[in-house]
Image (cartoon, grey):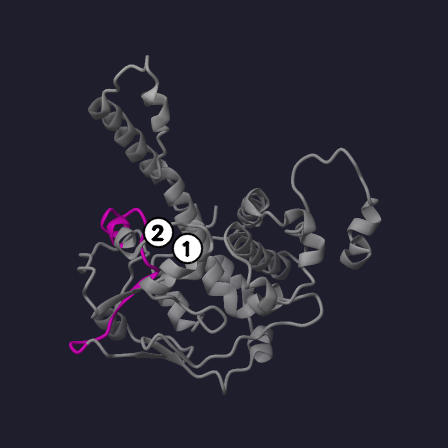
Amino acid sequence: MVTLPRYPARLILDEAAVRMRGLLSADDFVRYCTERNLRVTRERLHRLEVLRAFRPLVRIDRGADGNGSIYLDGLPAPNSFWDQWIIESYSPFTEYSVPEIEDNRVVPLYSAFQVWDLDDVLRRLNYEIELDWHLEPDAVDPSWEEHMERVLEWTEKRLQERSSKRRAEAALAQYISNAYLPSTLSNRRTIHLPQSSWYGGVLAYDSDSWDWYQYRENWDSEKVAERFGVTQDSLMRAHRGLRWARQDCDPLFDWSNMVQFVSHRKRAQLRGDALRAQLFRQMAGLFRSLFEDLYEDDVESVDKALGIRLDSVPEAKVQQDPRLHLE
């Protein structure tokens, strides 16, 4: 499987891999998740970090006055800089004291792609009880203390069994977003190049002197594979997992061949599960592009249904051409 580097935030910030998809403050990440039908609060994010169940991608020390900013120039920073200003909160090798939630000095920043990781965490932690079952006249009084003890035991086991797979895939998606996200956001006619030189007051970078086409030409996919332990099999598995997740939650999946021609601006106006599915689609597209670069081969489009199909209408030749398929 894809593996998480020892210092994922350092790799991402050294590469300034936040140009196409910026990092989010805790409040912005909560809003981002809520729009995608993941119910979480800033308080819960802080609690999950204390429990080491879900962490921000990075914590940045803004100095004594809490107003400091970091300028990213796309070049490696010296060790002294990282030791002083950066907490590698997403790394499994980092132990640190989580600041109080009101602390505005050491601020947490999240990647939008961490929704993929958080989705798995919440599935393991959220628990529903149908209380109406206990209101029936002949219902046996439940032993809530014993019941909750079993639930907590079961939940703790599920958290311990959780692998770092999704965490690594979220970090990988952020790292390669500069190279592949513009074409992934394409409406099959044009590419989308977000432009920004400053956000959040925490990180700054210059977009005016940065050329995406030149960056793409100099992109080294082999270096990515080495840093994230990427193999042909692990990348195919990651891509397939995202395809399943997108297909499972997307209410618009049956119209995928039409939606892919809609502009990114319009797709961003979706809400709930449909918007979360678009994020999974983007991640799968990033991994597909990396796969093509590494192995000069292709994997199936994220818009193609997984599972057994008993029909072949339209015929396979037409399905391979999105425009013919749409017609």
Q: Which mark is residue 325?
A: none
Q: Quadrant of residue 120?
A: top left
Q: Residue at x 23, y 27 (%)?
A: 149
Region of the chain picked out in magenta, as a range: 46-65
- Residue bearing mark 2: 40
* Residue occupying image coordinates x 67% and y 59%: 260
- Which amino acid lies under the numbered mark 2 shown in the image of this protein? Val
Callout 2 touching callout 1 (CB < 8 Å): yes
- The answer to which of 144 and 126 lies nearer the viewer is 144
Image quarter of the C terminus: bottom right
Q: CA distance from mark 2 to mark 1?
A: 7 Å
Task: Find residue 25 and report its horizontal and vertical position in percent.
Answer: 34, 66
Q: Secondary structure at mark 2?
A: loop
Examine the structure image and report whether residue 90 is included in the region drawn in magenta.
Answer: no
Q: Is residue 319 left or right of residue 290?
A: right
Question: Is residue 120 or residue 294 the one in the foreground?
Answer: 120
Taking depth in this image into account, of 290 and 283 the one nearest to the observer is: 283
The picture places residue 55, in percent across and down from the top left corner, at 31, 54
**Residue 15 in sight in this render:** yes
Q: What crowding class fits label 2: few (fewer than 14 Cα within 10 Å), some (14-19), or many (20 or more)?
A: some
Of the two numbered discs 2 and 1 on the same chain, state the one appearing first in sequence.
1
Q: Percent from the top left, x then y, of residue 54?
A: 32, 50
Q: Say which of 97 and 265 sits in front.
A: 265
Residue 209 rendering spot, x and y as whole percentages:
50, 87
Going by the picture, which residue comes out furthest to the front?
137
Numbered disc 1: secondary structure: helix
Q: Which label number is shown at residue 34?
A: 1
Q: Residue at x 26, y 24 (%)?
A: 147
Question: Does the stretch in magenta take in 57?
Answer: yes
Q: Is residue 176 left or right of residue 157?
A: right
Residue 228 visible in image: no
